[in-house]
Image (cartoon, rainbow, N blue to C red):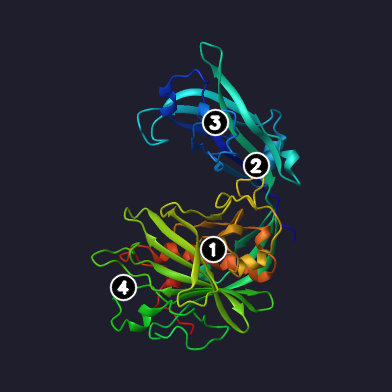
Amino acid sequence: MDPCPFQRILVGNLALRFPVSSKPSLLSLQCFCKIRLKNFPTQKATIPLVTKQNRNQNPEINSLSNSLAACYSLDKAKIDKFLSCKKPNSLEIEVYSRDDGATCGLRDGKLLGKVTVPLDLRKAESRPCVMHNGWIDFGENKKGESTQFYLCVRVEPDPRYVFQFGGGPECSPQVFQVQGSVRQAVFTCKFSLRNPGDRNLVSMPSMTEPTPSRNWLPSLGADKHPPAKERKGWSITIHDLSGSPVAMASMVTPFVPTPGSDHVSQSNPGAWLILRPSHGTWKPWGRLEAWREPNASALGYRFELLHDSVSASPATTTLVNSVINAKNGGKFTIDMTNSVSTPASSPHSSCDFGSGSGSWSGSEFSLGMLSPFVHKGFVMQSSVNNGNGPGSKPEVEIGVQHVNCTEDAATFVALAAAVDLSVDACKSFTHKLRKELRQSQSFVV
């Protein structure tokens, strides 16, 4: 099945320069902008100032900006809605200044001017298209001199594979690939609860039990007096339609409450290993940690990619460290669009933002073998429930450049399941979990 069409609108490389005759006090201003696109939340970004000494240079040359300020993702329905509008869609940017030292976005400053950039999504159906790249004049002082705003706006195709769980991961559902109204089963999930008496998580290096790398589990073997409250032993195995296991997420560090509390804290998070099959055993690919934020209204998480290493401790690359609203749910996203921008990979950085559309092997990324300098572009996104009911059906989007084989897609599906289950694992220990997640159920060893 073909991937689903997506497009992204990227805004970046912002810079602002005042007329040469401007007062010196203007150069001490803090400037920011509000970036608006109809039917999307407003995004905000700071704007670096260009002084009169480097006025004749472009921002990307003197490295004043060279970064992403805003990104909008459009699925096919949103793209079609854009294209059906009689009035051309535009990106609107309001530029503000503030000299009181307040944090950007908490309070509006003085409006300096507005900039509008027309968008034509048809031009970007098959290849990236720059809608604007350069200076725009707005406003004039008493001498007729304009303030200038520099920005780059680019629209690019961003096709993605879309998968949807047939039910909550704890219900061992099928996983469907989705394209429009067409759904095709591609994976099955098997959720398991390990026997609480089984303290040995790695009894056999088989395709039914994960083999953690080196010393990921030092605390489990040494823990002779486990806490009275803990959530542990959860795992979910992804199988292809032939029944072969192609990915796994295994809870390797129990989720336990902080002493004196009923919540899992960041100082002692629970953790999952995301594993891929390799030569008849399981090979760790990534590590997900999760905890409850101090205000208990958000789930904190961190995902690290594991690399082969001869040292005692595996080398890692942190791909995402963020939070999800624990009450309403949200999106787990790995997007490395602005993580790297080097001359080698971005010779035209004013239009690149490190999106990395060049050719390289997605399977190598999935094996965790490449350096961080090529972890670029949109990677994945999955919906996350709030843990308040069994009706969750997580949806997973994966950038096509990161999927070269079945195992690649399955690995991201397993990661999405682990994130979704972490919401339940991090719930207050005064909260009773659903029956599918309780250790009192029958165990799969």
**Mark 4 in CB contact with mark 3 (< 8 angstroms):** no
N-term mark: 2 or 1: 2
Which of label 1 and label 3 is nearer to you?
3
What is the secondary structure assignment of the residue under circle 2? helix
Residue where numbered disc 3 is placed: 54
- How many neighbours does mark 3 have within 10 angstroms: few (below 14), some (14-19), or many (20 or more)? few
Q: CA distance from mark 1 to mark 4?
A: 25 Å
Q: What amino acid type should be assigned to the residue bearing mark 4? A: Lys
**Mark 1 in CB contact with mark 4 (< 8 angstroms):** no
Residue where numbered disc 4 is placed: 229
- How many neighbours does mark 4 have within 10 angstroms: few (below 14), some (14-19), or many (20 or more)? few
Q: CA distance from mark 1 to mark 3?
A: 47 Å
What is the secondary structure assignment of the residue under circle 4? loop
What is the secondary structure assignment of the residue under circle 3? helix
Residue where numbered disc 2 is placed: 351
Q: CA distance from mark 4 to mark 3?
A: 62 Å
Question: How many marks do you count on the picture?
Answer: 4
Judge by depth and name the residue closer to the eye, 371 or 38.
371
**Mark 2 in CB contact with mark 1 (< 8 angstroms):** no
